[in-house]
Amino acid sequence: MFLRSYRMTGSGSSATTAHQRRLRSKYGAWALVTGASDGIGKAIAGQLAEAGFNLVLVARRREVLEALAADLARQHRIEARALALDLGQRTAVSTLVSATEDLDVGLLAAVAGFGTSGGFVDGLLDRELDMVDVNCRAVVELSHHFAGRFVAQRRGGLILMSSLLAFQGVPRAATYAATKAFIQTFAEGLRLELSRSGVDVVSCAPGPVRSGFEARANMRMSSAASPQVVARQTLDALGRRTTVRPGFLSKFLEASLLPLPRRARSQIMGVVMGGMTRHQNGSKEQQDGGLA
Ligand SMILES: NC(=O)c1ccc[n+]([C@@H]2O[C@H](COP(=O)([O-])OP(=O)(O)OC[C@H]3O[C@@H](n4cnc5c(N)ncnc54)[C@H](OP(=O)(O)O)[C@@H]3O)[C@@H](O)[C@H]2O)c1
């Protein structure tokens, strides 16, 4: 674990729009964002800083996190802590819990995650299991701890990352789609279970998003939503909806796929995934096993 704190207080930006004031009053003063070094997590962190939240930023890349924490602290006059952790490691969440015990955390955005693609039997088993650990096990562990804190304080919010792929099996991304189906179901259950305790849960189920995800999953996306749009719509949906499908593409695909039987949806998603992984054909190209 590596923790560094950046503090910049004064008359910087604070919640000014109704959207920002709602977030601050329901979930302030601290938010914990995993996967904050890139993509959707980074965009969520930026928008929360703009709303005046103090932040704990978690991912593996220490230098990237530190630069972001320093930048957000300076720009928005908040306090930001950078915590470098690999959430695939069994001890990561307990380390994170100890590092945040002194903070009034009201919002958990469990965004860290990654995908794999290609034939299941051709892939590395360790990498598939690491993905289950990061995408599912760490999220359950984090949610268990922070939902407990939120229930005790009778307020709080959880943002969990699902996907368009969560709603059917997907050939050539079978394990990844299954991790997201797990999160989708988990979020739906928690949302109802915790609603009477004043704790909000939202599942974010985007289609393709332009981020570090594509390279790490060894996919090629022809069209994708921006992380900023995903972040904005997800924060807006927290406390209002169970599932948000940010961006035009995810809404369009939802409308097209939802009326179809599950098997047909799987077949269509198999064709889509075939297109996204066509460049792998005929090569023994390995999926990236390291940082995106
Ligand atoms: N992009 C899409 O098309 C898409 C679509 C649907 C759902 N999603 C979901 O959205 C979430 C965010 O993805 P993204 O698009 O923002 O991808 P991204 O740009 O690759 O960001 C992933 C983030 O997770 C962190 N991370 C990955 N493995 C980690 C580990 N073992 N420990 C700690 N942090 C880790 C990465 O930081 P480090 O590399 O520094 O550790 C990075 O900050 C994921 O859960 C993904 O499944 C993405």
Image: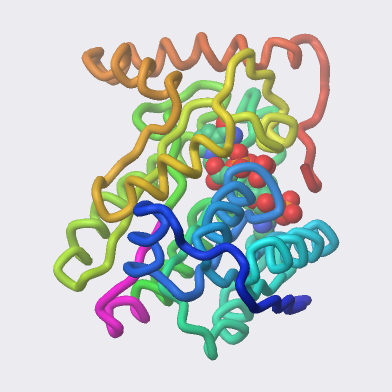
Location of the N terminus by quadrant is bottom right
Location of the C terminus by quadrant is top right
Residue 263 on the magenta segment: no
Question: Could you say where residue 130 lies in the image, as x and y percent from the top left?
Answer: 64, 52
* Residue occupying the far front of the picture: 11
Apparent side of residue 292 relative to residue 121 in the rendered image (left or right): right
What residue range appears in magenta? 148-159
* Residue occupying the far bottom of the picture: 102
Q: Residue at x 51, y 9 (%)?
A: 271
Q: Residue 291, relative to residue 109: is it above or below?
A: above
Q: Residue 102, relative to residue 222: is it above or below?
A: below
Q: Residue 100, relative to residue 33: is it above or below?
A: below
Question: Between residues 149 and 183, which one lies in front from this camera angle?
Answer: 149
Apparent side of residue 98 relative to residue 167 in the rendered image (left or right): right
Q: Residue at x 52, y 65 (%)?
A: 14
- Evaluate whether residue 45 shows in this view: yes
Among the 4 quarters of the image, the one containing residue 247: top left
Apparent side of residue 257 relative to residue 52 in the rendered image (left or right): left
Question: Could you say where residue 286 lies in the image, as x and y percent from the top left?
Answer: 80, 30
- Evaluate whether residue 175 shows in this view: no
Question: Could you say where residue 176 lies in the image, as x and y percent from the top left?
Answer: 53, 37
Q: Residue at x 46, y 62 (%)?
A: 15
Residue 158 on the magenta segment: yes
Q: Residue 255, relative to residue 63: is it above or below?
A: above
